[in-house]
Structures are given as C-alpha cells and as structure tokens.
Amino acid sequence: RASTKPALPLVKWDHVISPEEAEAIAGKLSAFPEVKSYRAGSSYRGRDVSVLEITAPTSSELVSVAKLTAWKPTLLVTGRQHANEVSSTSHILRLAELLVSDPAYQAILKKVNVVLHPVENPDGAAMAYELQKLTPTHMLHAGRYSALGMDVQSQVGRPDPLLPEALVRGRLWEAWLPDIYLNPHGYPSHEWVQQFAGYV
C-alpha cells in the first residue's frame, strides 16, 4: 500500500498508457482506503498483472469477500485483452480515480463493489506500446495479441494455460462471483476503420 495519496488526476488523455505506467498508477491508487491494489499474477514474459478491488472503506483489518458479495453486487471490469485497445486501460484507471476522489462516484461504493483489471494482456500491450511509437496512426495488429500470438481469451478457463496472465480473470471470477462483467474493447479515435475501406 502506498503511504501518501498522490495528486490527481493520474490518468492523462494525451498519450497511450504503457503496462508499466498502468502498474505504477495502480500502486499509487493503493494509498486510498477504498483501494486494495495487488499483483494478481504475472504474464508469460514475467510482467506483473495488477488488480484494484475498490470497496467502501472499513476500519476492519480483514475483510471477507464472501460477505461483501452477499451484501451488495459486484462489478468486474477487465481491459486490454487486445493490447492495441488502449482506451480501455485509460478509462478503467480513470474510473478508479473517480471512485476515490469524486463524491458522486464514492456514493456508488455504498451500493456496489468494483473490481478492476486494467491490463489483461501486458506482454501484447508492451509490444503495442513500442510499435505505436513507430507508427502512431496504425492499428498495430502485431501487438494485438499476446507474447505467443494468441488471444488471451482463448486461454481463459483452461486449468494449465500457456499464458499465465489468462489465470487472473478466472481467479477474480471465482473470488468475487461478479453480478456484472464488462470487457471494454476501445480504440483511440484515429483507429476507427472507415466503412467499406477493405479492412479485414
């Protein structure tokens, strides 16, 4: 847990958030009492995969997830399954900021638990991040999938997946039994494909 609350906002809209920056933001948000930020796993190439559990603050030293989920519904949001869908990470981390800083959003925590998994595919995200520096207006499909060139989703639910990062979503699902699950697939505006442009 970070010791001092950071100045907000941490999420800036003027650049793509790298997997390393996402991890740093998750760590800084752990200074807020509503946030439990932790390393939930690692990727094929050894990158950390962090999760933020955001719930109404409590003075308890230990908290039962079973009780939290019995008292109110849980929203689970995972982002960047496809590494070039960069806006999902930005919006997930911005939601975390708002839940700890904006009174209107803080009120939501009285009604729902929020579990955020900002970068599901950190190896692919690292590749896409480096490629976007070279060609910032291209969709960068070489960085879309994982370190092994397969969709992380194809590995979710397998007992012994080739991609260890695929285990995180399943662990979160088993721990929280979410009532609502969101997996946003978002692009920056320059990546929209024109109708009938021959894009396949």
Image (cartoon, rainbow, N blue to C red):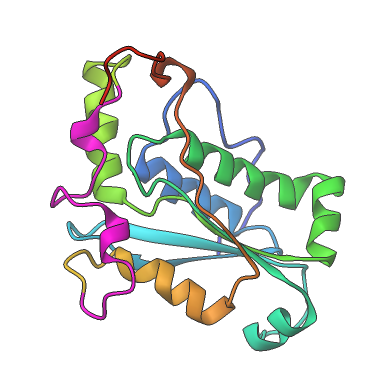
- Up the image or down, 3 lies above or below 199; here it is below
Give the left or right position of residue 94, taking residue 151 as reference: right
Quadrant the C terminus occupies: top left
Task: Name the residue rendered at 36%, 44% in the picture.
Answer: 19
Residue 7 rendering spot, x and y as whole percentages: 66, 39
Outermost residue toward the left in this view? 148
Task: Name the residue rendered at 25%, 44% in the picture.
Answer: 124
Asked whether residue 156 is drawn in magenta, I would say yes
Task: Name the residue rendered at 51%, 45% in the picture.
Answer: 184
**Picture quadrant of residue 36:** bottom right
- Up the image or down, 195 lies above or below 70; here it is above
Quadrant the N terminus occupies: bottom right
Disc tally is 0
Task: Name the residue rendered at 58%, 37% in the picture.
Answer: 10
- Up the image or down, 24 lies above or below 140; here it is below
Residue 156 rendering spot, x and y as whole percentages: 32, 67
Outermost residue toward the front in this view? 196
Residue 3 rendering spot, x and y as whole percentages: 60, 59
What span is colored magenta in the figure?
A: 139-160
Q: What secondary structure is the stretch in magenta mostly built from?
A: loop
Asked whether residue 66 is drawn in magenta, I would say no
Closer to the camera in the image, 176 or 15: 176
Residue 70 rendering spot, x and y as whole percentages: 74, 84
Give the left or right position of residue 141, taking residue 70 as reference: left
